[in-house]
Image (spheres, rainbow, N blue to C red):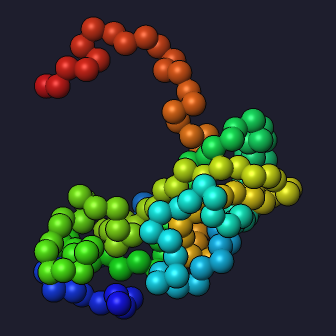
Amino acid sequence: MVRENEIREGERAVEMPPASDAGLIFIGRIHTPWTSRMMTPRQGRRDGPVCRIEVFEPWVAALANIEEFDELEVLYWLHMSRRDLVLQSPASDGTSRGTFSIRSPVRPNPIGTSIVTLAGREANTLLVRGLDCLDGTPLLDLKPERTGFTPIAPPQPGDFEVG
C-alpha cells in the first residue's frame, strides 16, 4: 500500500525553489467525503457522491446563470500534495515516469481539474458529482465545460501552422 509522502523506488524529488506569489485567490472551498488521499478516488465518477462547492463572497454573484450548464470544469488547489517529485512511479513497480506525463496530484503547482455534473444549487453552494479531491480543498475557478461551446470565429489560414 502506498503511504502519503512516500518516495517509491524509481521516484526522484528535487529541492523546491523559493515561492513567488502568482496572486491566486481562493474563491471558495470544496466539501467531499474524503479526508485522506488514500480514500480519494483516482478519477471523479459521474455516479459518485454529491459533493458541495461553496463559493465565498464577493464571488457569489459570479454564479449567476450557472444552472444553464449541465457540466462544469472545476479548478482547485491540491493543498495537501507534495510538490517536489519530478519522476514518479504511479504503478509502484519501480518504473518511473515524468510528472508531466501522468495525472498524479503531485505537481510543482498542484492545480487539479475535474469535469463535474451539476446536480443543483443552494444559494452560494453548488451540488456536483464527479470530484476527486479532499474535503476542504481550496477552489480556484469554475467554468462551463468547454466542449459545449462552438468556436467564436471560423478557422483562418495559418491558425494551425506550427512555426
Q: Is residue 17 visible?
A: no
x, y percentage for residue 17? 24, 75
Give the percent coordinates (x, y) of residue 23.
Answer: 48, 60
The residue sitting at the right extreme is: 123
Res. 70 visible in picture:
yes
Q: Is residue 10 left or right of residue 1?
A: left
Q: Is residue 138 above or below residue 148?
A: below
Q: How many marks?
A: 0
Residue 148: quadrant of the picture: top right
* Residue 120, percent from left and from top: 79, 52
Relative to 7, 119 lies left or right: right
Q: Nearer the viewer, residue 55 or 45?
A: 45
Q: Is residue 61 left or right of residue 1?
A: right
Work out whether 43 lies above or below 89. above
Residue shown at 68% from the left, 72% from the top: 31
Query: Quarter of the image holding residue 160?
Result: top left
Quadrant, the N terminus: bottom left
- Residue sitting at 22 percent across and 86 percent down? 8
The residue sitting at the top extreme is 157
- Give the x, y percent position of residue 48: 63, 64
Above or below for 139 versus 117: below
Left or right of residue 132: residue 129: right
Residue drawn at x 65%, y 77% is 33
Quarter of the C terminus within the rendering: top left
In the picture as drawn, the residue positioned furthest to the front comes out as 47
